[in-house]
Image (cartoon, grey):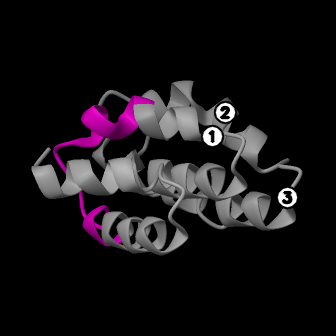
Amino acid sequence: MDEIIKGHVATIQSGDRVAQGQAFAALMEATETPVDWTYEAWDELLKTLTHRDNHQRAIGAQLLCNLAKSDPEGRILKDFDALLEVTRDERFVTARHCLLSLWKIGLAGKQQ
């Protein structure tokens, strides 16, 4: 993972909404195609699914769904229940963002 991506992953966990949004947009764009740094960011993104901040839960869910195409180990299958839990989030918008991204997992491969 290069320093720019590392910085974006750290920034999405910050409280600065503007910087968080810019980092999120950059990571979503970067993950539109397969990446080689999936597992370097995976555990941090997985932790965001239960974060007290609903923005971080939504961001983490969307990025994990995008990373499914870069997941040859199939971790998304093991962590799918955690993503499904976000679809029941107390904040409707958070649940909606997750729901709207889940389809990307199905396109990631036959096993998914």
**Residue beneath label 3, please?**
91
Q: Nearer the viewer, residue 42 or 23?
A: 23
Which residues lie in the magenta part? 29-43
Mark 1 neighbour class, 10 Å CA radius: few under 14, some 14 to 19, many 20 or more: many
Q: Residues within 10 Å of mark 2 (few under 14, many from 20)?
A: some
Residue 44 drawn in magenta: no
Q: From the viewer's perspective, is residue 107 above or below residue 37?
A: below
Q: CA distance from mark 3 to mark 1?
A: 13 Å
Q: Nearer the viewer, mark 1 or mark 2?
A: 1
The reply to whether callout 1 and callout 2 are in contact (CB within 8 Å) is yes
Tell me where residue 21 appears, x and y as whole percent: 47, 72
Quote the CA–CA distance across marks 2 and 3.
Answer: 16 Å
State the mark number for residue 106: none
Q: Is residue 30 magenta?
A: yes
What element does badge 2 sit on?
helix
Left or right for 36, reference 13: left
Q: Residue at x 50, y 64 (%)?
A: 16
Tag on residue 82? Answer: 2
Measuring from the top left, give residue 20's x and y in whole percent: 46, 65
Above-or-below relation of 45 to 18: above
Left or right position of 41 against 63: left
Q: Is residue 74 visible?
A: yes
Amino acid found under the numbered disc labelled 2: Ala
Task: Please give the residue where the numbered disc 1 appears in the rendered image.
Answer: 49
Q: Within the image, what quadrant is residue 50 found in? A: top right
Mark closer to the chain start, 3 or 1: 1
- Residue at the image point whose x is 50% and y is 60% from the top: 104
